[in-house]
Image: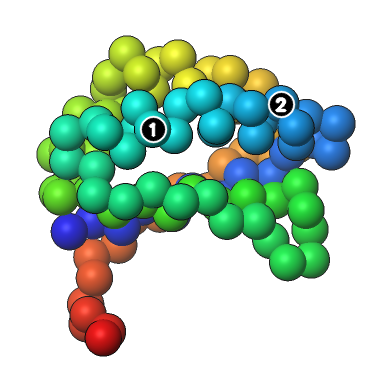
């Protein structure tokens, strides 16, 4: 399992537009082959900073998504709303809690 966290800082005036983009694409991303989970987090102190938290079956599935037509539609529209470059990290789950 791969956990992908992407931290995005938006211009204040574009937060609502980003939320629209996310809302329109979230179910498509969740149903993409290999995606096991997707959620959107907002920073407690900075309401213009969001992170997506997604879980992928493996790195190959994540890369297929990143090379997909869907990503090619969603990411450019999202990226142009940024106030700073996104920071993306991938992790393996070391210890499963619960």
Quadrant containing the C terminus is: bottom left
Q: Residues within 10 Å of mark 2 (few under 14, many from 20)?
A: some
Mark pair 2, 1: CA separation = 17 Å
Q: 38 and 14: which one is in front? A: 38
Residues 41 and 75: in front is 41
Q: Secondary structure at mark 1?
A: helix
Q: In this image, 42 relative to 71: left or right?
A: right
Q: Which residue is mark 1?
A: 27
Q: Is residue 43 above or below residue 58?
A: below
Residue, x 71% and y 26% (percent of image)?
Answer: 17
Find the residue positioned furthest to the right.
13
Q: Nearer the viewer, mark 2 or mark 1?
A: 1
Q: How many marks?
A: 2
Mark closer to the chain start, 2 or 1:
2
Q: Which mark is residue 17?
A: 2
> Is 78 placed above or below 72 here?
below
Q: Position of residue 59 (x, y in %)?
A: 18, 46
Residue extending farthest to the bottom is 98
Q: Secondary structure at mark 2?
A: helix
Residue 89 spot, x, y in % from top left: 40, 54
């Amino acid at each position: 399992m791969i956990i992908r966290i992407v931290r995005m800082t938006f211009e204040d005036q574009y937060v609502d537009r980003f939320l629209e983009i996310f809302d329109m694409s979230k179910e498509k991303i969740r149903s993409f082959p290999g995606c096991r989970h997707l959620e959107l987090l907002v920073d407690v102190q900075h309401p213009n900073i969001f992170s997506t938290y997604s879980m992928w079956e493996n790195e190959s599935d994540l890369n297929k998504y990143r090379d997909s037509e869907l990503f090619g539609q969603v990411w450019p529209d999202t990226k142009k709303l940024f106030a700073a470059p996104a920071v993306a990290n991938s992790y393996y789950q070391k210890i499963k809690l619960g």
